[in-house]
C-alpha cells in the first residue's frame, strides 16, 4: 500500500508520511550505485522522497494546508506502491532499510534509528503504566484506548451522531439513553443539540422543546435534583433503585449493624474518611495525568496575575486534589456567565472541607481556586484570553470531579465498606440506612409532577448486585442479633482455611465479611445448587474482582498473587462439599433469609411497575435472578424457558370468564415462593395493566393511603389516579420482623391482625378488583371510614394490585 507502520503484537501504529524520507533516504547511495542515476525509476524515487518531505506538517491547522496534506499523502503512497511493483531493486532496497530500522536483538544501539523515528510521530509509544502519569488526552475514566471526543465541537457532534440521527428519522429508534453525560464538557448544550438536530436536521442549540425521548445516566447524590431546564425526560433510574431499596432496610438497626461490622473487622470504619482517601488514591494513581493537566492549566492562570504568580504547581495540584476529594456530588454545571446557587454551595463547601484536611497549607491557594471555580476571576478585567482560560478550567474541572467520584465511590469505596452491602449501589450512599414510606411517597409525588417519564430501575448492566440479591441482604438489617451469632460461628468454623501472607492473616476479615453477605445474597435456590456447578467459581471470581477494585490488598494494575491465591483458596474451601459443619449451620439461615427476600422482591417489583415513570426490566430479572456485578450479570439468559413459562401463565391467566380457576392457579403459585413464575406472573399482569391504561400511569397522581393497625409500619400503600380511574398498590415491607422465624407468609391472615388500609372519600362507592386473582374485593365498613382489611387483601397473593372503578 506504500505505507510504513510500527507494529507491536496486534497493534499497528501508522508512521507520519512526512517522516518516510528517514527510511527511504537511508543508504540512498547504495541504490544509486545499483541503478543508473539517470534511470527513470531512480529519478522517480528521488522525486517521491522530496514529495513526502514537503508535505504540510501534521500539526498544521490552516484548512487549506490540512486539505493539501490529506490529499497529497495518499497520492504519494500510491506512487510509491506502484514504483515498488515495477522495480524489484527499489523494493529490495526499501526492505533492507526496514530491516536495519527494526534493529537486532542483543545490539541496543541498533534500535536508535527506530527510536528517533518514533519520537517524531504524533503519538508517544510508552510502557502502559506510564499513561496514569503522562497521558494528555481525556479518556473514559482510565481506559487508555477509549479517547474522549469533544462533543462541544459542532463538527464533531454532527459527524459522530449522523448515523444515530438517521436511525431516529427512519423510525428504527424511538429514543436515546445517554450514558455518562457528566463526562461531557457542557451537558446542557449537548442535550439541546440532540433535540434540535432531530427536529430540524441542523446542529442548533435551542429549539425550545423536547420531542425526542431522551433519558440520561445521571447519578444524583443525596438530595441533588436533576436540572429541570435540561431537554430530557429523566434519568436511567439509579436514584429510584436506591430509594426503593431503602424501603426494605430497617433504619432502626443502624447502630447494631455498625457495631456488628466493627466487631467483626476489628476496628471502626468511618465512611467519610474512607471515601476521601479513596478519591485521593484514584487521583494520584489511575487519574494522575488528568490531575496534572488541571494543575498545569491552573498554574498558567495563576502566572498571569501578579497576586497569584507565586503559587507553585505542586501547591495548586494539592489544592485541586483536596477539593475534588471533598466534592459532595459528581459534578457542578457551571457554564460561561452562569453559576447557580446550588453549584456555588457545592464548591464553597468543598473548598471549606479541603482547607480542614491538613494544617500548614496556604489558605490563599484555596481561596484562589474557589474564585476560579466560581469564575469570579474572569471579571477582573485582564482580557478575554484570561477570562476564557478561567471558564475553561472551571468546566474541565467539572469533567474531572465526575470521573473521580465514580472511581473513588463506586469502584473503590463500595468495595472497601461492607456494613450492609445492599446499600453499596450505583447512585447510592451506604451512610443512608433505610427509607421511611413517607419519604418515598414524597419523592414519588415530586417525580410524578416533574419527571413522569423517567426510567424506573431495580437492576441494570452496571448495578453491583441484582435486585433479588439486594432483597435478600436487606433482610439482615431486620435480624441483626441472628446475623451476629451466625457470622461469629462461621468465622470460627472457617478460621483454619486462612493462611499467612507477609505474616498477616489472609484473606482479611473485611473480605471475609463481604463473602458471607455475598453468599447470603447469591446462593442458588434450594435444589438448584447442583444445576449451577460453576457457583463456587463465580464466587471466587467475584471476590477476586472485589479485592482488586478495593485496591487495598491487591489491584488491577499491581496484583498481589499471594493474597489473591489466599482469597480464592479460602472461598473455594468455604464452599467445598466436605466443609459440612459450616454448610449445616449456613444453609438453614440462608434459606430463612432467602424466603423473606423473595417477598421483598415481589414488593419492589410491583412498586416499580406502578410508580411514576417507565419501568425497565434488565435481562433475566423476569424470574428470580441472583447475579452479581459485571461480568456475572452478563451471563446468557435462558429466554426459551421464560417464553415457555410465560405462555403457560397466559393460558390460564387470561381466563377472565372463569375467575375461580384463576384464583386456584394463583394459590398454586403462591404455595411455593421459590417458584420464579410468581415474579413472572406479577410482572406480566402489572405490564398488562399499564398497557390497558397508559394515561393512568403516565399522567396519574400518586396519593399515599392511610394505614392503621398494629402492623401499619409493615405496609407501603398508595393510589395512582387519573380522572375516574384509580389503582391501589399495597405491598409488605420489613417482612422478617412481620413474620418472625417460622414459615409464615404475608398471605397468612394471622400476621396482620387488625391492620387495614383506609379508603379516602374519593374511593367511596367504588368497585375493586384484584388484578392478580381477578376477584372482587369489598371494603369493611365497620370502622369510621371504609377500609380494606389487609388479612383478606393479601390472603391469596403476597402483594395487592387493585383496580377501582365507579359502580355502574
Image (cartoon, helix red, strand yellow):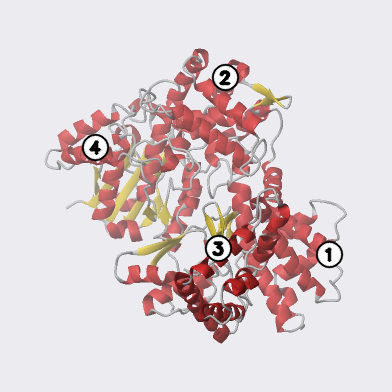
Badge 4 marks a residue whose secondary structure is helix
Badge 2 marks a residue whose secondary structure is helix
Q: Which numbered disc covers residue 95?
A: 3
35 relative to 803, above or below? below
- Residue most extreme to the bottom: 64
Q: Do tag 1 and tag 4 residues touch (Cβ < 8 Å)?
A: no
Q: Position of residue 396 (x, y in %)?
A: 64, 67
Q: Earlier in the sequence, mark 3 or mark 2?
A: 3
Q: CA distance from mark 3 to mark 2?
A: 68 Å
Question: Would you name the residue on which mark 1 appears?
Answer: 312
- Residue most extreme to the left: 657
Badge 1 marks a residue whose secondary structure is loop
Q: CA distance from mark 1 to mark 4?
A: 67 Å
For the residue pair 547 and 9, the one nearer the viewer reads as: 9
Badge 3 marks a residue whose secondary structure is helix
Q: Earlier in the sequence, mark 3 or mark 4?
A: 3
Q: Do tag 3 and tag 2 residues touch (Cβ < 8 Å)?
A: no
| Residue 773 shows in this picture | no
Q: Is residue 70 left or right of residue 28?
A: left
Q: CA distance from mark 4 to mark 2?
A: 38 Å
Q: Earlier in the sequence, mark 2 or mark 1?
A: 1
Q: Is residue 349 left or right of residue 440?
A: right
466 relative to 309, above or below? above
Residue visible at 25% across and 49% down in the picture: 688
Question: Would you name the residue on which mark 4 appears?
Answer: 645
Q: Earlier in the sequence, mark 1 or mark 4?
A: 1
Question: Would you name the residue on which mark 2 appears?
Answer: 490
Q: Which numbered disc covers residue 627?
A: none
Q: Is residue 675 left or right of residue 498?
A: left
Q: CA distance from mark 2 to mark 1?
A: 54 Å
Amino acid at each position: 500500500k506504500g505505507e510504513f507502520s510500527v507494529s507491536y503484537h496486534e497493534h499497528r501504529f501508522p508512521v507520519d508520511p512526512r517522516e518516510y524520507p528517514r527510511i527511504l533516504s537511508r543508504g540512498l547511495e547504495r541504490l544509486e550505485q545499483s541503478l543508473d542515476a539517470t534511470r527513470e525509476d531512480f529519478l522517480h524515487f528521488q522525486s517521491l522522497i522530496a514529495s513526502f518531505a514537503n508535505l504540510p506538517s501534521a500539526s498544521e491547522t490552516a484548512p487549506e494546508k490540512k486539505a493539501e496534506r490529506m490529499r497529497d499523502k495518499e497520492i504519494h503512497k500510491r506512487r510509491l506502491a506502484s514504483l515498488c511493483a515495477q522495480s524489484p531493486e527499489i523494493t529490495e532496497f526499501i526492505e533492507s532499510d526496514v530491516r536495519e530500522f527494526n534493529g537486532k536483538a542483543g545490539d541496543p544501539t541498533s534500535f536508535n534509528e527506530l527510536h528517533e523515528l518514533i519520537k517524531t510521530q504524533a503519538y508517544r509509544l510508552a510502557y502502559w503504566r506510564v499513561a496514569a502519569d503522562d497521558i494528555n488526552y481525556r479518556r473514559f475514566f482510565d481506559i487508555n484506548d477509549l479517547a474522549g471526543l469533544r462533543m462541544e465541537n459542532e463538527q464533531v457532534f454532527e459527524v459522530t451522531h449522523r448515523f444515530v440521527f438517521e436511525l431516529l428519522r427512519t423510525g428504527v429508534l424511538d429514543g436515546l439513553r445517554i450514558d455518562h453525560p457528566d463526562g461531557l464538557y457542557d451537558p446542557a448544550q449537548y442535550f439541546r443539540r440532540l433535540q434540535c438536530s432531530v427536529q430540524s436536521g441542523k446542529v442548533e442549540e435551542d429549539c425550545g422543546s423536547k420531542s425526542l425521548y431522551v433519558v440520561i445516566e445521571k447519578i444524583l447524590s443525596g438530595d441533588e435534583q436533576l436540572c429541570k431546564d435540561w431537554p430530557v425526560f429523566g434519568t436511567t433510574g439509579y436514584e429510584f433503585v436506591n430509594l426503593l431499596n431503602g424501603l426494605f432496610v430497617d433504619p432502626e438497626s443502624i447502630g447494631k449493624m455498625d457495631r456488628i461490622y466493627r466487631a467483626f473487622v476489628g476496628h471502626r470504619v468511618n465512611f467519610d474518611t474512607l471515601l476521601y482517601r479513596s478519591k485521593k488514591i484514584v487521583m494520584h494513581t489511575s487519574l494522575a495525568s488528568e490531575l496534572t493537566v488541571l494543575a498545569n492549566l491552573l498554574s498558567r492562570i495563576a502566572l498571569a496575575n501578579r497576586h497569584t504568580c507565586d503559587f507553585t504547581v505542586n501547591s495548586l495540584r494539592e489544592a485541586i486534589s483536596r477539593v475534588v476529594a471533598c466534592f459532595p456530588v459528581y459534578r457542578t454545571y457551571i457554564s460561561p456567565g452562569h453559576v447557580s446557587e446550588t453549584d456555588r454551595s457545592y464548591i464553597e463547601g468543598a473548598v471549606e472541607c479541603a482547607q480542614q484536611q491538613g494544617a500548614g497549607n496556604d489558605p490563599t491557594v484555596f481561596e484562589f481556586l474557589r474564585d476560579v471555580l466560581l469564575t469570579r476571576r474572569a471579571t477582573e478585567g485582564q482580557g478575554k484570553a484570561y477570562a476564557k482560560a478561567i471558564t475553561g478550567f472551571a468546566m474541565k474541572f467539572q469533567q474531572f470531579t465526575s470521573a473521580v467520584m465514580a472511581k473513588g465511590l463506586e469502584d473503590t469505596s463500595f468495595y472497601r465498606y461492607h456494613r450492609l452491602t445492599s446499600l453499596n449501589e450505583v447512585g447510592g450512599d451506604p451512610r443512608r440506612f433505610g427509607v421511611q414510606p413517607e419519604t418515598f411517597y414524597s419523592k414519588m409525588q415530586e417525580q410524578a409532577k416533574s419527571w413522569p417519564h423517567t426510567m424506573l430501575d431495580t437492576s441494570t448492566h452496571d448495578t453491583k448486585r441484582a435486585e433479588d440479591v439486594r432483597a435478600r441482604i436487606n433482610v439482615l438489617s431486620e435480624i441483626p442479633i441472628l446475623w451476629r451469632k451466625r457470622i461469629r460461628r462461621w468465622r470460627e468454623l472457617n478460621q483454619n482455611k486462612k493462611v499467612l501472607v507477609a505474616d498477616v492473616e489472609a484473606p482479611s476479615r473485611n473480605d471475609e465479611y463481604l463473602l458471607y453477605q455475598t453468599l447470603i445474597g447469591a446462593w442458588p435456590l434450594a435444589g438448584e445448587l447442583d444445576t449451577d456447578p460453576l457457583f463456587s467459581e463465580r464466587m471466587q471470581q467475584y471476590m477476586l474482582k472485589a479485592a482488586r477494585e478495593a485496591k487495598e490488598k491487591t489491584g488491577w494494575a499491581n496484583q498481589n498473587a499471594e493474597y489473591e491465591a489466599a482469597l480464592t483458596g479460602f472461598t473455594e474451601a468455604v464452599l467445598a462439599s466436605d466443609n459440612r459443619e459450616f454448610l449445616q449451620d449456613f444453609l438453614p439461615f440462608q434459606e430463612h433469609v432467602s424466603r423473606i427476600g423473595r417477598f421483598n422482591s415481589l414488593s419492589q417489583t410491583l412498586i416499580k411497575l406502578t410508580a411514576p415513570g417507565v419501568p425497565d426490566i434488565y435481562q433475566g430479572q423476569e424470574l428470580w435472578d441472583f447475579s452479581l456485578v459485571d461480568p456475572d450479570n452478563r451471563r446468557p439468559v435462558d429466554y426459551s424457558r421464560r417464553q415457555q413459562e410465560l405462555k403457560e401463565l397466559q393460558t390460564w391467566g387470561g381466563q377472565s370468564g372463569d375467575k375461580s380457576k384463576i384464583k386456584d392457579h394463583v394459590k398454586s403459585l403462591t404455595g411455593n415462593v421459590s417458584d420464579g413464575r410468581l415474579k413472572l406472573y406479577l410482572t406480566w399482569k402489572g405490564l398488562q395493566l399499564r398497557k390497558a391504561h397508559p394515561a393512568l400511569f403516565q399522567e396519574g397522581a400518586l396519593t399515599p393511603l392511610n394505614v392503621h393497625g398494629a402492623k401499619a409500619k409493615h405496609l407501603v400503600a398508595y393510589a395512582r389516579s387519573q380522572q375516574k380511574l384509580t389503582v391501589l398498590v399495597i405491598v409488605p415491607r420489613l417482612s422478617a420482623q412481620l413474620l418472625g422465624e417460622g414459615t409464615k407468609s404475608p398471605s397468612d391472615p394471622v400476621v396482620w391482625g387488625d391492620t387495614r388500609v383506609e379508603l379516602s372519600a374519593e374511593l367511596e362507592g367504588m368497585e375493586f378488583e384484584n388484578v392478580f386473582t381477578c376477584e372482587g374485593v369489598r371494603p369493611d365498613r365497620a370502622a369510621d371510614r371504609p377500609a380494606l382489611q389487609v388479612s383478606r387483601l393479601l390472603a391469596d397473593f403476597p402483594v395487592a394490585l387493585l383496580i377501582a372503578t365507579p359502580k355502574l
